[in-house]
Image: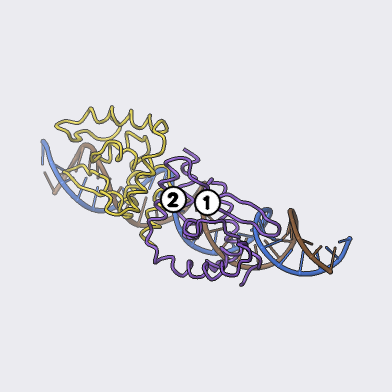
Chain colours: A yellow, B purple, C blue, D brown
Amino acid sequence: MKPYLQKLKCLGDETRIRILRLLLISLEELCVCEIVDALDIPVYTISKHLKELKNAGLISEQRDGKFIFYSLINAEDNFTESLLSAVLNIPGNIFSDNNDALEKRLKLRENGTCVIGMKG
Amino acid sequence: MKPYLQKLKCLGDETRIRILRLLLISLEELCVCEIVDALDIPVYTISKHLKELKNAGLISEQRDGKFIFYSLINAEDNFTESLLSAVLNIPGNIFSDNNDALEKRLKLRENGTCVIGMKG
DNA sequence: CACTCAATTGCACTATTTTGCAAATGTGAT
DNA sequence: ATCACATTTGCAAAATAGTGCAATTGAGTG
């Protein structure tokens, strides 16, 4: 039960849902500072939520130099797949501000990767 | 965001997941006392969780004399549908004790409805 | 109306979770 | 080694959620 409950609990927080949505929509790995700018939430808060999502097995982490990128795991089981599909089925307008901010932020990438820090 | 988050939060509690599983598997309305016996959890705890599930719009309530029956809503939107399908995708063995107890309890029905109280 | 029983509720208590800040870590550059 | 900067972490405070019991409601019955 524990792993299932852990994933479910993870989805019970607005910030984590917003993070998952960004990753679901953008379909690529995102740098912590890009997520911070897209959601306009303090780094340490984002960082802690990312940790929980990772512990729950919903996202994975790759470091590239100074930057740390997170990406969705690809759901290997029906349970996780249904969960992610639920997140994706939340109407998009709720997230339009976040998406706009992310889009703007992603334009600042160079060679397809993050090169600037926070407060961009 | 609120209604979506409310449903998601609802799924972050083990007791509520067990209640939903019973309703999903049995595919019929269940009396509070039947749920109590199936899960072996105090009535007042069950009652409070049922209330939350109802407030979240996941189940509905019908009184019939002394007894109150709860049943799953039929998901009208993709979001809710995905959520319920996630619950259904949790491996069944975790719930086998509950299912066995429920089955035993349902045998005590008369004319297809609950006629006895708690601690059956 | 009084009694019984199913179910809910109010309140206090105890987790569990979230947040905020300051300090620490890790990495690249000078 | 020092500095700058992205990110994480530890710890205390604040907010939220869950539990247990006693009291209450609501419905049926004598």
Q: Do the residues at discs 1 and 2 belong to one chain?
A: yes
| Dot 1 and dot 2 residues touching (CB under 8 Å) | yes
x, y percent for residue B41 = 55, 66
Residue C8 x %, y %: 65, 55
Q: Residue B18, position in %: x, y?
A: 48, 60
Label 2: few (<14), some (14–19) or many (≥20) C-alpha neighbours in 10 Å? many
Label 1, label 2: how far apart the Cα atoms are: 10 Å
Q: Secondary structure at mark 2?
A: helix
The chain letter for the residue carrying disc 1 is B
* Image spot of residue B108 (x, y percent): 60, 70
N-term mark: 1 or 2: 1
Query: Based on the displayed image, in which of its 4 quarters is residue A70 positioned?
Result: top left
Which structural element holds mark 1?
strand
Amino acid type shown at disc 1: Leu
Disc 1 crowd, CA 10 A, few/some/many (<14, 14-19, 20+): many
Locate residue A46 relative to residue B76 in the image: left or right.
left
Q: Which residue is mark 1?
A: B72
Host chain of mark 2: B
